[in-house]
Amino acid sequence: MGNSIKKRIEILARYQRLELDIARTRRQVDEVGPRLDALAQGLRGYEQAVEDGAARITDLKKRYRESEREVQANLAKIAKSQDKLRLVKTNKEYRSSLKEIEDMEAANSDIEDSMLAMLEEVDAAETALVRAKADCERESREISAEQVVVSADADVFREALARLEEDLKVVSGQVDPGLMNKYLLVREKQADGIGLAGVKKAVCQGCYVNIRPQLFNDMHRWDAIYNCPNCQRIIYWDESGEKEEKVED
Ligand SMILES: [Zn+2]
C-alpha cells in the first residue's frame, strides 16, 4: 500500500510548496528586465535635461551673434545715412535722413537691450546646466550601483529557480499518483492554484471557514483523504501551534 496517508499528504504539501515557490521565483526573474528598463529610463530623463540645457545655451549664443551682426549692419547703415546727411539739399530730405538715423539708433538700442537679457539668460542656463550635469552624474552612479544589485538578484533568482525545478522533478516522482490526480482536479477549480490546505484550530487555511468538530476530530486519525466541505480543497490537520489541543464536540 506504500506510504501512510500522513506521509502522502506531507509529500504532496512539499510538492505544492515547490510549485508555489517556483511560480513566485519565476515572477521575480520576469521582473528583472522591466526593473533594468525602468532604471535606464530614469537615467534617460537626466541625460535629456543635460542635452536640453546645452541646446538652449547654443541657441541663445546663436541668437546673440545674430543680434550682434544686426547691430553692426545697422551701424553701417547709420554711417552711410550720416554721409548722405552732409549732402542733402532740402530741409525735407534732411529731416527724412535724420529720422532714418534716429529710427536705426532706436532699433539698435532695443537690440542691445535684448542682447543684455540674452547674456543673463545664458548665465542662468549655464548655472542650470552645471547643476543638471551634477544631477546626471550622481544619478548615473546610483543607477549603476542599482543595476549591479538587480543583476546580482537576477542571478540569485535564476539559480534558485533551477534548484527548485530540480527539487520538483524529484518530489513529483514521490507523490502518490492517485492523490496527485485528486489534487490536480481540485486545484483546477481554485483561482489561487492551491489545491491542498492545512486546517489549523479547525479553520481551513484555504478558505478560512470553520470545519465541523466531528470532521476535524476524524482528521486527527489520518485514516482518509478529506476535502473541505466549503472550498473542496484537500485538507489535512496542521498541527503547528496546537500540538496538544483537541477540539471537543
Ligand atoms: Zn476550505
Image (cartoon, rainbow, N blue to C red):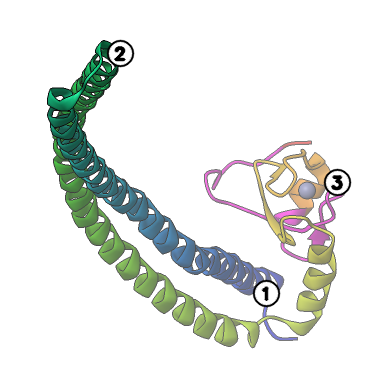
Query: Magenta segment, principal secondary structure?
Result: loop
Disc 2 Cβ-to-ligand 1 distance below 8 Å: no
Q: Residues within 10 Å of mark 2 (few under 14, many from 20)?
A: few
Residue 156's place in the image compared with 170, above or below, is above
Q: Whole-percent x and y of residue 132?
A: 21, 43
Q: Which stretch did the figure color magenta?
A: 219-247
- Helix, strand or loop at disc 3? loop
Q: Is residue 224 visible?
A: no
Residue 8 badge: 1
Callout 3 amino acid: Asn
Between 157 and 48, the residue placed more toward the observer is 48
The kind of residue on which mark 2 rests is: Lys
Classify mark 3 as within 8 Å of ligand 1 or not, answering yes or no.
yes
* Residue at the image position 77 percent from the left and 55 percent from the top: 191
Mark 3 — residue?
A: 230
Image vertical order of residue 2 relative to residue 85, above or below: below
